[in-house]
Image (cartoon, helix red, strand yellow):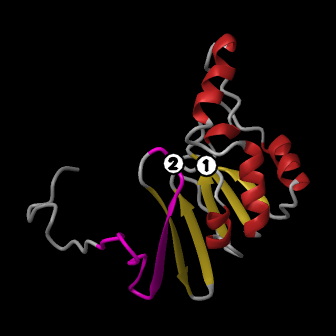
Amino acid sequence: MGWPKDGIFTNVNINDFTGDKYQFELDGVKITSIPVPHTVPTYAYRFEAKGQSVVVSGDLTYSNEFAKFAKNTDILVIDGMLASDFYFVPEQARESLKNGLKQSHATLEDLAKMAAESKAKKLVLTHIGLGKVDIPSISKVFSAAGYKGETIAAEDGLVINP
């Protein structure tokens, strides 16, 4: 670990995602980005190569544009903060914490709606907050919203194949 000998700004390509410059290609991978709703500037990225795609969101609240952006992706990696049971938080503070987080993170119902609208084949919940994720229960909520793909809780070292 540490800093490279030639500095951190050497051999680096910086792409400006301001205005209408939300797309470029790198080593055969098409990379597209859109801003997503959050309390600070946040983006989602779509990576496409060899007929497959992965969409990765930053923190976000519900966005119809995001669901369109993620349309038919093979793997959708999305902010799952409010999918957690928050069991680490004292019971009397849980609802207050969750209500505060709804200003900057999608609710489980909103995640289910975006997943269903996107028609992603696999959904990976990441940025899971303070607790456990009950995938069978979450899958029922997603199924009720019309999502037909697989739902996965992210964990360190997870490898997913489209």
Above-or-below relation of 94 to 151: above
Q: Position of residue 119 (x, y in %)?
A: 77, 70
Q: CA distance from mark 2 to mark 1?
A: 6 Å
Q: 60 left or right of 132?
A: left
**What is the residue that sits farthest to the front in this orientation?**
19
Above-or-below relation of 112 to 48: above
Residue 121: in sight, yes or no? no
Residue in front for this viewpoint, 16 or 53: 16
Q: 161 left or right of 22?
A: right
Residue annotated with mark 2: 38
Residue annotated with mark 1: 61
Q: Position of residue 89 (x, y in %)?
A: 61, 18
Magenta part of the chain: 15-39
- Residue at (41%, 53%) from the top-left corner? 41
- Residue at (47%, 44%) from the top-left corner? 39
Q: Which quadrant holds residue 159?
A: bottom right
Identify residue type, mark 2: His
CB of mark 2 within 8 Å of CB of mark 1?
yes
Q: Which quadrant holds residue 87?
A: top right
- Residue at (66%, 56%) from the top-left corner? 124
Q: Say if the magenta span includes residue 106.
A: no
- Residue at (44%, 88%) from the top-left corner? 28
Identify residue type, mark 1: Thr
